[in-house]
Amino acid sequence: MSDYTPPIDDIRFVMNHVADLGGILATERFSHVDADSIDAVITEVARFMADEVAPTNVDGDRIGSQWHASDGGPATVVTPDSFKSAYEKWVASGFGAMPFDPEYGGADFPWISAIAVQEMYTTSNMALSLCPLLTQGAIDAIHAHGSTEQKNTYLPKMMTGEWTGTMNLTEPQAGSDVGAVSTKAQPIADSDGAWSITGQKIYITYGEHDLAEQIIHLVLARTPGSAPGTKGISMFVVPKYLLNEDGSLGERNGAECVSIEHKLGIHGSPTCVMQFEGATGWLVGNEHDGMRNMFTMMNNARLSVGLQGLSLSDRAFQQSLQYAQDREQGTAPGAPKGAASPIIEHPDVRRMLMTQRAWIDAMRALVYTNAAALDRADAATDADEQRTWRELADLLIPLSKGLCTDVCNEMTSLALQIHGGMGYVEETGVAQHYRDARIAAIYEGTNGIQAADLVGRKLAMRSGGVITDLLDEFDLRVKELADIDGLATFADRLSEAVSTAREATAHLVSIAGSDPRSLLASSTPYLRLLGTTVCAGFLAKSAIAASNGADYPADFLSAKVTGAKFFGEQILPTTAGLLAAVTSRADDLFALTSDQLL
């Protein structure tokens, strides 16, 4: 079982030479932040995660979080002891507050720097990292839509991590269909605008735990007389403990974890069934604005889940690379007859390792560019510039979430394959990454929902113009790539993929208004086709920067070029085979009855 080595140089390179950190820091919005400060944060966070958080990952899997009934009181959830120590040090570090509003204790760093911190936290221990991730979403919603009193009451301690937050959306009868939510909110007479919340929520990450003294639940519920569907949903803030007038913790609120799920992976993260029995809550924003508020939480959360795909792929790759270097088996081509060779010398193992490495670079380029677009939209002072960056960020969200988490399932599977039979047993630990990864394609909107969002909402932006603008940028990059020694074939493959993406995009735009069933049937292969092409376009930028001699060691730059070349020549051409699936009608999907499918 390998230790975790934070990929500091890879993170710095993609931030500076692909995502253009310098351009972000040059804006007036982020002029108070300098590159040296961000670099210092990355260095210290890397040390912290490797030393304090990464060693807790195995405890999270093998010990897990435990639910305990209580005589006469609410049930409790106990996390592994190592989690408590690591989380306490995380709170003391102050890194969690880095990207947030300084009025409430944040440092107002750009979001791309927070993504770097999240990457290393998630790679160290995904199950533990989910606690601050959910708190992040709750902070975003309260900051954007809460009252001044709510912001002053909750945000300072949530930003430090002293208090944590949750998103309470899903119900037993309402999975991804948020409009089917039935939790009720009744106004409490003669109160300060308080409401009584009653209902059950499922799959609530860190809905109960012992890492922090207070948990701030954000709960979707229906008020009396509200319209059916999503238009009738409101959001409420429901603290675990009510607060006294001096801000200290008061009596326990009517929110209890009645059970936790027994899951395939992320055992250290308690996934709770929350029962609200007349719990006291307060509206966040206006009545019936719950869906708008929810999407404030979910947009950044979806980017962070895409980041999980990158992080778990990297942790699994580091372990499989170490194993391939140490494990001797068989005689590799060119080795002395009868000699036992490290399996890294076998071509098929090299193929799997190169595939992992190339996809990790590709995912990092995608996710960090996505974060950079959010920062540039936030920093833009011109309306047209802001719209351009916002459109790019919105387009990349379903690609980051959907593509990275689908690919992660494949990359963690390759890591297990490299271990052979030792990967299939739990002792080596690589199976944990495979199991932990599987949830990322499911939560925060299944990847089918991400694909539907891509062809439904994002394709509709300027009738496909946002997508074709990005493809135009890649066409310009093809010419620059072709002039670099050894990258002409990559340039040809990128040109072909861009052409394929244009054809697929034009087809979907043409049927969007007339054949919605075929549009949705094409959505998943289209996400893979477009996402792979976009990754290649960003890797082309990486290869150009590395070839031009960026300020990194020569071996590092050479590896960047080789990884991008491998992606362009051996992974990118798979997009051609997806075109037929994108342009096919949905008829065959529904040609069989349900009985015939048996």
Image (cartoon, helix red, strand yellow):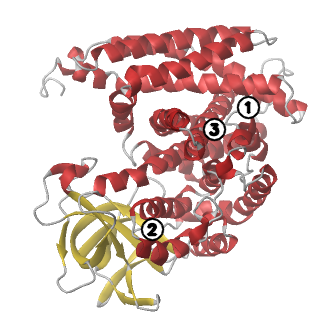
The nearer-to-camera label among 3 and 1 is: 3
- Looking at the image, how many numbered discs can be counted on the residues? 3
Q: Residue at x 50, y 16 (%)?
A: 575
Q: Amino acid at mark 3?
A: Arg
Q: Residue at x 46, y 46 (%)?
A: 302
- In the image, 548: left or right of 157? right
Q: CA distance from mark 2 to mark 1?
A: 46 Å
Q: Does residue 481 show up?
A: yes
On residue 165, the disc is: 2
Vertical arrangement, residue 8 with respect to residue 366, above or below:
below
The residue that mark 3 highlights is 364
Vertical arrangement, residue 206 with respect to residue 341, above or below:
below
Looking at this view, name the residue that lies furthest to the front: 382
- In the image, 320: left or right of 561? left
Location of residue 274 by image quarter: bottom left
Q: Which quadrant does the C terminus fall into?
A: top left
On residue 343, the disc is: 1
